[in-house]
Amino acid sequence: MFKKLDNIIEPSSDTSIWRYMTFSKFISMLANGALFFSEMDKSYDQFEGAIPFEQAMMLRAYKSIEIKSKLEKSNFLDAKADEHIRDHFVKLEEEVKKYRFLIMTNCWHMNSVESYAMWKLYVDNEGVAVQTTYERYKNSLEDYGQDIYMGKVIYYEDKINDKDMLTRAFHKRAIFEHEREFRAISFGNLPKTKDEITDEHTKRYIYHGEYIPVKLDVLIDKILLSPAAPLWYKDIIENTLMKYGLKKDVSCSKLDDKPVFG
């Protein structure tokens, strides 16, 4: 179930989005009929869901003054003031870490054309890029019963204006701006009690994420083969798609085109 966040911008319906993946991840998507949403705290960028260091220090200074002021008014300002302040931030940090564990993301690259950089970053010699649009992506998840939030990632240099943790999960440092990322976020199907824990919850703990079912025929528009893939690779991908009841356009990367001089 799609839910909109006020400060997060949705792509236009016809925006092309790309998922670059290894062959094994492609097979995993087909076999499970699902997209894998990975836990945010396992991201290679440990700043995801956090705020910039300088901004955090400034907020801590303001909060420390606020706590001391309250203690003064209650005649409770004593040698334990620093301890109260430290306890506050320890609890706050624990809450943020817990939230980063609960949040799961599925990330795509926004571009009208394929990206050489994305091939290099995410795919080996035998991978694919799944091309779709934002509208198709959203429609492929319409039967999922849990809340899903979608939007463009906001890239920042030194400050995040949003205090809300969920909105903050759509922010990344400017050094990752080349990713031009669209992402979907979900908390998945979390158990409310120990008695509700199933094998699927156990899998999430082991996999550090969750497979969320999608309509693959709706999701996938086209398949692009990785550059320099062997000639027989196209047959492998087409036959694999047919095995899962899918007939999609499979084409070679533009990077394999040969120039004509003169």
Image: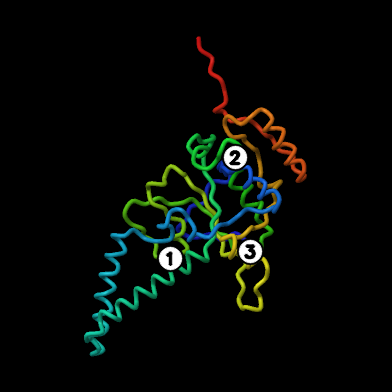
Q: Which residue lies furthest to the bottom in this view?
A: 75
Q: Which amino acid does label 2 sit on?
A: Ala
Category of crowding for the residue at label 1, using alpha-carbon neighbours closer than 10 angstroms: few (below 14), some (14–19), many (at least 20): few
Q: Which residue carries the number 2 mark?
A: 129
- Residue 73, by quadrant, is bottom left
Protein image colouring = rainbow
Marks 2, 1: nearer the viewer? 2
* 204 versus 154 height, above or below: below
Can you tell which of label 2 and label 3 is closer to the viewer? 3
Question: Dot 2 surroundings within 10 Å: few (below 14), some, or many (20 or more)?
Answer: many
Q: Tell me the CA gap for discs 2 and 3.
A: 26 Å
Residue at screen point 71% across, 46% down: 217
- Apparent side of residue 57 relative to residue 230 in the rendered image (left or right): left
- At numbered mark 3, what does the secondary structure look like: helix, strand or loop? helix
Q: What residue type is labelled 3?
A: Lys
Seen in the picture, residue 194 relative to 260 is either above or below; the reply is below
Q: Residues within 10 Å of mark 3 (few under 14, many from 20)?
A: few
- Extreme residue in the top direction: 262
Provide the residue designation for mark 3.
203
Q: In whole angstroms, how far apart are the C-alphas of marks 2 and 1?
A: 33 Å
Q: Residue at the location (34% across, 58% down)? A: 52
